[in-house]
Amino acid sequence: MQRKTLYDNADYACPIVGTCLTVAELRRICRKCGDPVSEDASDYDAHVFLVGQAKVAGGGPAKYLQRFLDKKFRKELRAFLRVDDPAELRRMWRERADAGDVPGPFWAMMSHPTAPDALLRDIYGEVHMLSHRVGAANRADLARLTRLEEKLAEAEAALEESKAVLRQAVAVWKSRCREAMEALSVERNKRQAAERERISLREAIENSAVAAVSRERDYLRAQLGDAVARLEATEAEAGRQALALERAHAETASLRRDLADREGEVEALEASLFTALGDAAAAHAAHAAHHADAPESLVDHAGCACREHGLPEGSCGEACACRAAQAGLVGKRVLYVGGRCSLVSHYKLLAAKFGCELVHHDGGREQSAHRLWELLGAADAVVCPVDCVSHEACALVKQACKGCLKPLVLARSSGLSSLARSLTELGSGHAH
């Protein structure tokens, strides 16, 4: 059923415009309609204009106002349009009105296609009385303002009293400061007299013990010379140490640059190896298809060219017997525990070249042990690089594979070539 339009609710246009639009929205919609209301006109004039336009059937302002209200209160419209029962509609209105949310639910009820007229009249009456209560509340606010002004006057009087007390306290403080300054002057005179007496006493001591003081001075001068020499030696040693430290820093920086270069070379070599292994695995698939009808031709392993190039058996494109072993991985699921997260995508691509699916678990860095048990249960074989996995995860994998009788390969490294050798070992059935 189609929702009611503003024209259908012409009797309620005034409360709809006044309740569902703010003053800023009211002015903006008037400007959208060609600014028929001047800027110096009152908000009431703008309200009267929109109410009049809402009652014009098919008018441009009424259509624009309808779309604006639908967009502004689309959430409330969706909630109320799902309900047809008048009692439920009344409950939803009461719940939102008690929470202080009036504009959106009011428009949703006024435009509801099945809301009974009695319910709409009740809601209209409630919104109408709400405007009167707002006016009464404003009058109460004025009364409260008067009481607050009286309290402000009382607070100002109390502040003046506090200021008087403070001025008295300042006067007492100044008096005490003067007394303290006088006492300080007396004490300063006493100290000056004591200083004069000390100077006189020192002169008397110097005159009576000039020789002793001279010897002590020479001894101290000698000690000072030794200390200066030790200080110079220490500073020289510190300079040498600083120079050595600078050289060490320079060497460290050079070694780090060399290490970065080596890491780049390793990554490039691994990428090249991955490409070579991918091409070899693709050749393996063609080779296995070629020998599908003659398995007896895959018995001899002695002539495999893979070993001569340092690659896993079956990686070459020649007619070699090791391809029958790799064919054992087709359709299998291999669990790879640990390794480097940056190479996981390469691991999976390499496994796909071997005809199997590779699932990865990080060995407990972020994934849980429970997840490892789930993956172990669904895997046909397991590969675990011992150089990039925790001891706990490695022990768990060993125990689980031993209990479930699953093939396990403990790879020496987490590189791509090591994974290729492990997959070849799994396909040939030589895994433990």
Image: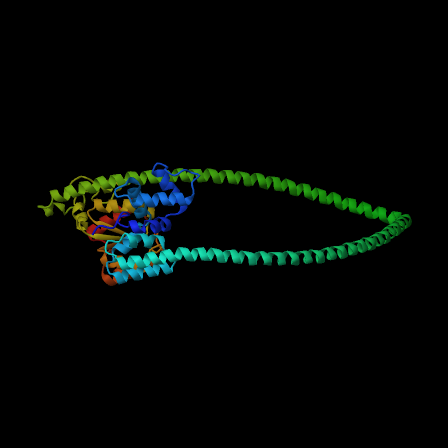
Q: Number of callouts in the render?
A: 0
- Seen in the image, is 91 located left or right of residue 157? left
Give the colour scheme of this rendering. rainbow
Residue pictured at 25% horizontal, 39% vertical: 276
Assign the C terminus to one quadrant of the image: bottom left
What x and y, as percent, mark residue 383? 27, 53
Place of residue 302 in the rendered image (x, y in percent of width and height, measured from the top left)? 18, 44
432 sits left or right of 16 in the view:
left
Nearest the eye: 60 or 360: 60
The answer to whether any part of residue 361 appears in the image is no
Q: Please identify the residue farthest to the left as the structure is shown.
A: 293
Q: Nearer the viewer, residue 295 or 91?
A: 91
- The answer to whether residue 61 is seen in the rendering is yes
Which residue is at a point 83% across and 52% down the rendered structure image? 185
* Residue in the image at 35% along x and 38% along y: 32
Q: Quadrant of residue 158?
A: bottom right
Q: 389 or 166: which is nearer to us?
A: 166
Residue nearest the observer in this picture, 30 or 195: 30
The extreme top residue here reads 34
Q: Position of residue 322 (x, y in %)?
A: 18, 46
Image location of residue 403, percent across then percent down: 25, 63
